[in-house]
Image (cartoon, helix red, strand yellow):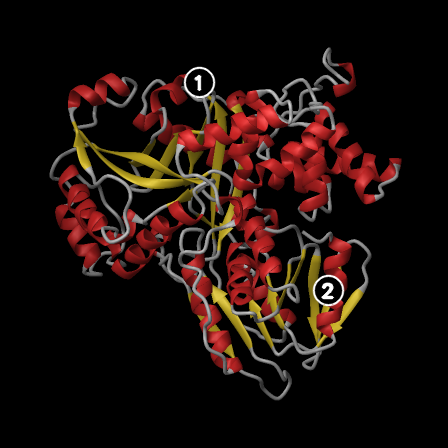
Amino acid sequence: MRNRVEAIAALKAAAAGEPILIVGGGINGIGLFRDLSLQNVPALLVDKADFASGTSAAPSRLIHGGLRYLETGEFALVRESVIERNHLLGNAHHLVKPLPVWVPAFNWFGGVLSAGLRFLKLKKTPGAKGILVIKLGLVFFDRFGRANNTMPGHRIVSRGELRRRMPSLSPRVSAVAEYYDARLVHPERLALELIKDGERDCPASAAVPYMALAGSDGETVVLRDELSHEEIRLRPRLVVNCTGAWADEANRQLGIEGRLIGGTRGSHLVMRRPDISRQLADGMLYFETRDFRACLVYALDADHILLGTTDIRATDPDCATCSEEEIDYLFDVLEQVMPGSAAKREEIVFAYAGIRPLPYSGEATTGAISRDHFLREFEPDGTRRFPVATLVGGKWTTYRACAEQIADSVLSRLGLSRRHSTLDAPIGGAANFPNDAAGRQEIARMLATRYALDETVAAALVRRYGSQAEDVAKRVAADGGESIDETGLYRAGEIRWIVAQERVTHLADIVLRRTLMPFENAVTQASLERMAQIAGEALGWDAARRQQEISATAATLEGRYRVRIAPGTPAAALPNAS
């Protein structure tokens, strides 16, 4: 992957013509960038921050079929979601994993009338749902995904199995239905791999982080480098606004007034709860709360769980943080489904929030707002010579279908036909990578032997990078296998590879998006200092810049994400330091 300086040079070269400009480096803008590259249509992708650093970095980390959308009659959205989920299980199997989901119900027959009224659009507020309503929804859910499904259908869990596997589940639960969805282990990595694939297949395309949309005079669009403050002017043939929760702001920069977005904030907590993680094992609880919202909890690893989510109206995506009231709410809903859980704030290791880019709506109930997406097109007028297409909505599960629909609109404007589909295109590390545990273990053993690595290190690289693991292993071995601190979760050579190959601009890019350190409770002061040293050597940071990066990253982690940074032991002081 080109470094950022090279990407900016490619952007400037393209700016001499009339490029397609995609504003917004979240998953939907990235998906469009990838699709156009397969059609050999060069495009420029810019974001005012890092790739996938806004709403795309704050999901429930699921690729889900949208079971609850059935209640509001959004059958087309559910069908699309299930089909896209099934394809991602194949196209990105290194990062998208099957996930058994348990749906507890507190009665057998409740909610039949309420669900029917909501389905008929005669009622907007949700109500309690018994197991009969849930099972009926799952029948449709299974049917939608039958054509390309690779996972079991739904079932009703026996009471004996229920109490044996999850003894802490509320005794008020009458029955539990089980179905399968999917977990997205590392969303930000999947987004980055799509960019890599796009630039590989269409070298004239370029994606640049920390490149803001600064304005437009009707003829040209002004981009501003957020590092150097240099301004770059270009005359786009078309601008596609994929900025999500920032869409109205970006439209105003392009001379378009009006409100399209009415976002809601969703917050999640990563907590150190090995007792709950042990019961959840490899599954997820997807449960209804007293206020008839849907919440979830699942294990990230043997010690940590992910608990979410809230759904609160919010308008400022730049200030999306998990509030004290949301923490109280999430603790309360966990207590509802697992009485005696007694969650405490000191158990939180990471808290994050994002603004869903939902369409502006006067609905009193946020859950009644559609989660579907649409494209709003603005043709040239007396003051603006180029068309603008603005995406409203969009989510991780359906990003590929959404991008395909936008790309088809772009191709139509250009008078071109689609050459290739992304429906079955492997993504990044999924290419030429086995989709079975035995095959992956064999690769890990091979890497351990070939590069003299500990097998646990090799297995971690395979798990994180798929078919790209050998490239990382070479770099780790060249550095002597040195860890960045005493946790041993990340190696210096791995961080060097990330900095060299993944368009890192700031230290926070590594910590929050190129790795999963906050989710693993693995951030230490020693690791921040070592990573800043590694990044500084590659990117030309002097001592002052390194300290600035460390301080800024630590302040963000502690202030915005509630991360407690332990001192840690510097790598040089470890017994096996080389």
Camera-side residue: 530 or 36? 36
488 left or right of 328 in image: right
Secondary element under disc 1, as helix, strand or loop, is: helix
Task: Give whichever of 135, 116 is nearer the camera.
Answer: 135
Question: Would you name the residue on which mark 2 appears?
Answer: 10
The front one of 189 and 140 is: 189
N-terminal-most mark, 2 or 1: 2
Q: Which residue is mark 1?
A: 274
Residue type at tag 2? Ala
At horizontal 62% and vertical 79% (from top left) the residue drawn is 237
Disc 2 versus disc 1: distance between alpha carbons? 48 Å
Q: Position of residue 525 (x, y in %)?
A: 72, 25
Q: Within 10 Å of the Cα at label 1, are there few (<14), some (14-19), or many (20+) other Cα atoms?
A: some
Kindly identify the amino acid type of the residue bearing the numbered disc 1. Pro
Please state the horizontal and vertical placement of residue 466, each as a whole percent of the image.
52, 39
Residue at x 79%, y 53% (from the top left corner): 227
